[in-house]
Amino acid sequence: MTANPGSDLNQQALRTDVSGMPLEWISYRQAVRFYHLDVVAYTCGALLYEVHGGINAITGKRSIVEVNSIIATRGNVKGIHKIRQHYLAPLNNTALFKRDGHMCLYCGNKFRSKLLSRDHVTPISRQGQDAWNNVVTACRRCNNHKAGRTPEEAGMELLAIPFTPTHAEYVYLQGRRVLADQMKFLLAHFPRTSPLHDRLSREMNTLV
């Protein structure tokens, strides 16, 4: 199995269900597998790559699978939606830092991931939870200064209220390199009141 020259095989495709709800990011190998299983309902977005398979012994023609940036697959839609209703995004630093735009929510400066840390607004030592609604991205300097205190006790202003991402937002947060058409598609599934919706809408407008 080979791809056409110039293709970036590290670029992920966005998989959705038949109703268009985002599910996950998939590699080109996973995308080809869905085609092989005949569960691809439709595709949209830009063409990412053409994957060339084996040659048919009867026709002498080589199989070609075109992989688009967004792929809708058939499946147990009711089961998926039932699970999503009770979905709680797993907390990890990669997604947390991306949720907050790699910005320290105390000093307002942006940093590379290795210079950032997870801060508990209400410290664990004060019965604070290690949960989305109680954690923010902080640079190491601000985190060390705040220590085991609340922002009020440390005289530090929290620049944004922490929030729990929805399933669609978490899919976005897990993406390694999200293309413009994938971003636009995902944005349509974000709550309009979400801070992520506001931030990404502004970013999309700068691309127009």
Image (spheres, rainbow, N blue to C red):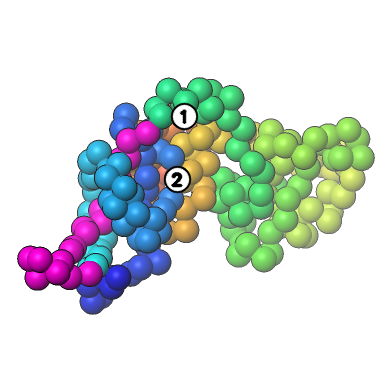
* SS state under label 1: helix
- Does 83 sit above or below residue 110? above
Q: What is the number of callouts on the image?
A: 2
Q: Does the magenta portion include 68?
A: yes
Query: For the point 49% across and 39% down, which residue is it?
Result: 169
Residue at screen point 39% across, 27% down:
77
Dot 2 amino acid type: Glu
Residue 146 image point, x, y percent: 83, 48
Q: Secondary structure at mark 2?
A: strand
Q: CA distance from mark 1 to mark 2?
A: 12 Å
The amino acid pointed to by label 1 is Ile
For residue 62, what is the image quadrant? bottom left
Q: Is residue 57 left or right of residue 72?
A: left
Residue 159 showing in the rendered view: no
User: Viewed as shown, does residue 174 lie left or right of 78?
Assistant: right
Q: Main secondary structure of the magenta part?
A: strand
Quick check: 172 above or below 178? above
| Classed neighbour count for the residue bearing mark 2: other residues with Cα under 10 Å, few (<14), some (14–19), many (≥20) | some
Tag on residue 80? 1
Does 201 lie within the magenta span? no
- In the figure, 24 relative to 12: above or below? above
Is residue 85 left or right of 191 when viewed as pictured?
Answer: right
Instruction: Specify few, some or many for label 1: CA neighbours under 10 Å numbering under 14, 14-19, or 20 or more.
Output: few
> Mark 2 sits on what residue?
24
Please provide the residue range marked out in magenta.
54-75
Q: Nearer the viewer, mark 1 or mark 2?
A: 1
Residue at the image position 37 percent from the left and 48 percent from the top: 14
Measured as percent of width and height from the top left, residue 162 is found at 65, 36
Q: Quadrant of residue 89?
A: top right
Residue lying furthest left in this view? 59
Identify the residue at image location x=23%, y=45%. 44
Q: Position of residue 51 (x, y in %)?
A: 25, 65
